[in-house]
Amino acid sequence: MGANPRRRRAAAALVAATALLVTTAACGGGDDAAEDGQITLTVDVFGQFGYEQLYQEYMAANPGVKIVERGTGGNLDEYSPKLTQWLAAGKGAGDIVAIEEGLLVEYKANPDNFVNLLDHGAADLKGNFLEWKWNAGLTADGKHLIGLGTDVGGMAMCYRKDLFAKAGLPTDREAVSKLWPTWQDYIRVGEQFTAKRTGASFLDAATNTFNTILLQTAGNAQGYSYYDTSDNLVVDSNPAVRQAWDTTMDIIDSGLSGKYAAWSEEWVSAFKQSKFATIACPAWMTGVIEGNAGPGAKGKWDIARVPGDGGNWGGSYLAVPKQSKHQAEAIKLATFLTSAQGQIGAFKAKGPLPSSPQALDDPAIVQATNEYFSAAPVGQIFAKGARELKPVYMGPKNQAVRTEVENAVRTVELGQRSPEQGWTDAVTNAKKAAAK
């Protein structure tokens, strides 16, 4: 479906404004024009980025470009090994690739795999992003910009109003928020919910909750989790990691988890079958929930504040691999998608919270509501604290270490290990993963 005339003009104007960024493609990138005058740009993503309508607008303004997206809805654990393999092989990657914040440091270790956007005038875009978001895309020496920021995570708690009502709990989002100022309060409410035998668990998966608590605790303390800012592995010495572990063990011990492996088919089915009542909910998760739960659950979900104090989970970047044969056009498209209007469009489509100050101040964000989530004022809930988000530093093997720690959480959740046995496994296996 094509864009309306007003949005077409906006897209065309933005593309023209960014043309200066891409007057020259990097050497070795190949010809930017196909024989028939049209090129195809492949965009590799995971999860729900919300770009479908933006692609239509861009193609309407650039009839010589066709955009193909790969990987929508895909699991990050499946996506990242493929991207690593494509980069190592020098072929196979898209013209634009999404990089999740937890993997960014790992890819920055080999910056020559990517076009340096600073060589194409991207420095002029710095003011379009929150300062910490922009800085995270740079190599340590500040001379190579790997990618342009898409979203930031933010944090809330999504919940099923119908299941709360069935358990005799409040359903109004303000009242629900007051139920759990702390994670211990969240556990207490969960025990009340469980006692009512609604047929649903209180939460989906202990791993999702663990990651939320860890990033929240680390952001409010040292500013790092598994690695310190000197890239030393501190999984067993950072108090934030152990604190998140112990709180999660309390949640598991209270029998609150549905024990669904996050991102599995069982997890997706649990949304549709109303098998759990709460889920840790960064802004981008709203699109995941709607996609998994389906139209039949519209109006049954709502959004409350997260226990504890804020937090940030998620956020990505768009990068252009040097192996792209259409580098100049890829840079133009990445610039369009990460512009303020691009980020607003993605937010409207799937909920990822903009990392652009201009977008965060736009009425389209500030006044935004989400009808699927009972007309929740998502602009106020998520955007209000976006500027004050406390980012958490991610080390060189963050994703591999995180996977091992969460695998250990999972073994305790399934009753295969005691909390202390699980902790020993987490530390041991995390060190092995970091050493590879």
Image (spheres, grey):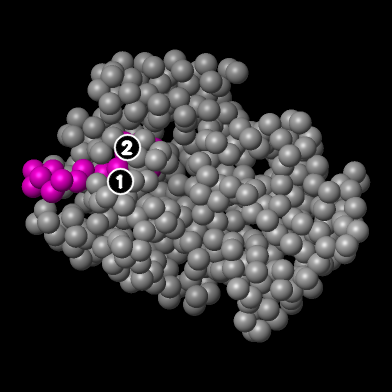
Report x, y in % for residue 158. Answer: 31, 55
Residue 164 horizontal side relative to residue 109, left or right: left
Report x, y in % for residue 175. Answer: 19, 63
Residue 282 horizontal side relative to residue 18, left or right: left
Q: Which residue is mark 1?
A: 270
Identified at 36% across, 59% down, the residue is 294
Identified at 78% across, 71% down, the residue is 63
Residue 311 visible to an observer of this rendering? yes
Is 93 in front, or is 120?
93
Q: Are marks 1 and 2 in contact (CB under 8 Å)?
A: yes
**Residue 436 painted magenta:** no
Q: Identify which amino acid the numbered label 2 is placed on.
A: Tyr
Report x, y in % for residue 348. Answer: 49, 68
Is 81 in front, or is 292?
292
The picture quadrant where one finds residue 61 is bottom right
**Magenta-highlighted residues:** 193-214
Q: Which disc, if any, is residue 260? A: 2
- Give the SS element for disc 2: loop
The picture quadrant where one finds residue 332 is bottom right
Identified at 81% across, 59% down, the residue is 39
Identified at 40% across, 21% down, the residue is 426
Q: Residue reaching furthest front?
A: 36
Report x, y in % for residue 336. Answer: 69, 65
